[in-house]
Image (cartoon, rainbow, N blue to C red):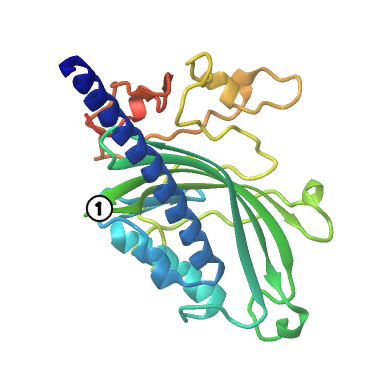
Amino acid sequence: MEADIAELKKEVSLLRKELSRVSDEAEVRKVHFKYGYYLDKCLYNEVVDMYADHPDAYVEFLGSRYRGKAGIKRLYNGRFQNTFVKGRNGPVHGFLLDHIMMQDIVDVDPTGTHAWCRMRALMQAGTHKSVRDTHPRGHVQWWEGGLYENEYLKENGVWKLFRYRYFPFWHAEFETGWSLTKENYIPWPTKTYPEDPWGPDEIIEQKMLWPDTRVVPFHYPHPVTGKRVEEDDLRAPHYGQDSAEAEPPLSLALPEGQERKGEGNTWSNEGSVRVLPELVENQ
């Protein structure tokens, strides 16, 4: 009898851990989807509040980083809010900015306080012809496809965005499609804060826009083989060209001054390693 009770207690403990993991994965997924709904409607105050207060929080976007809550506010409440909606919090008539979030892969570590998520975004954006004379973008419509490789942090029991990496992969004018998209469709930041009042804290060598087709690195190993994708295979050489001649692979490395205390550790569930050892946050 005692052995049976001990076995039952063990099974209950395992079930609790599994339930917590599944519940945390669902919450992380919801956090990102809710972020997307606020972003769609230019509710930038609410977007900023989705981010962790941790000093290591940042946004990596278009070859630059906006670090800490102050930098994150500068991107959303400065650059985006003033460019798209002239400083207001919320939508303006005739401006579309819808983000469809999908194909999410969420992995939560055993502490239940740190998570990774790889997700795809498909954006439809533009202006209605009725506002072409009043909106600074004129009369435009375009598509954008991008990938996230984000980290999330549980602060005071609440999941929040932590290290946000968005790689806008391709753009296309609605009328002409992606095969005729001009290179460097979105201008790269060239100045940092405070020289640029809405600028990033640092400019980094992570510049990728269509027709560049390099692979955004995966936070996880292959689920069957357990192997990582080789760095050369993350490159995108021209057809027939040796990969050594192509642009270097992209990276999920941390900025200077940040570290992962759990780096090198391995954790798994359901028989699979969930996150590459060098990306494990907690010990």
Residue that appears at 29% across and 36% down: 16
Image x and y of residue 78, in percent:
42, 70
Q: Which residue is mark 1?
A: 157
Element carrying mark 1: loop
**Amino acid marked by disc 1:** Gly
Is 45 situated above or below 220? Answer: below
Image-based side of 55 in relation to 186, left or right: left
Which image quadrant for residue 7?
Answer: top left
Image x and y of residue 142, in percent:
72, 61
Which image quadrant for residue 266?
Answer: top left
Image-based side of 257 in relation to 225, left or right: left
Image x and y of residue 59, in percent:
40, 52
- The quadrant in which the N terminus is found is top left
- The quadrant in which the C terminus is found is top left
Q: Nearer the viewer, residue 46 or 56?
A: 46
Residue that appears at 26% across and 33% down: 260
Q: Nearer the viewer, residue 56 or 118?
A: 118
Q: Is residue 195 visible?
A: no
Image x and y of residue 134, in percent:
66, 86
Is 197 situated above or below 170? Answer: below
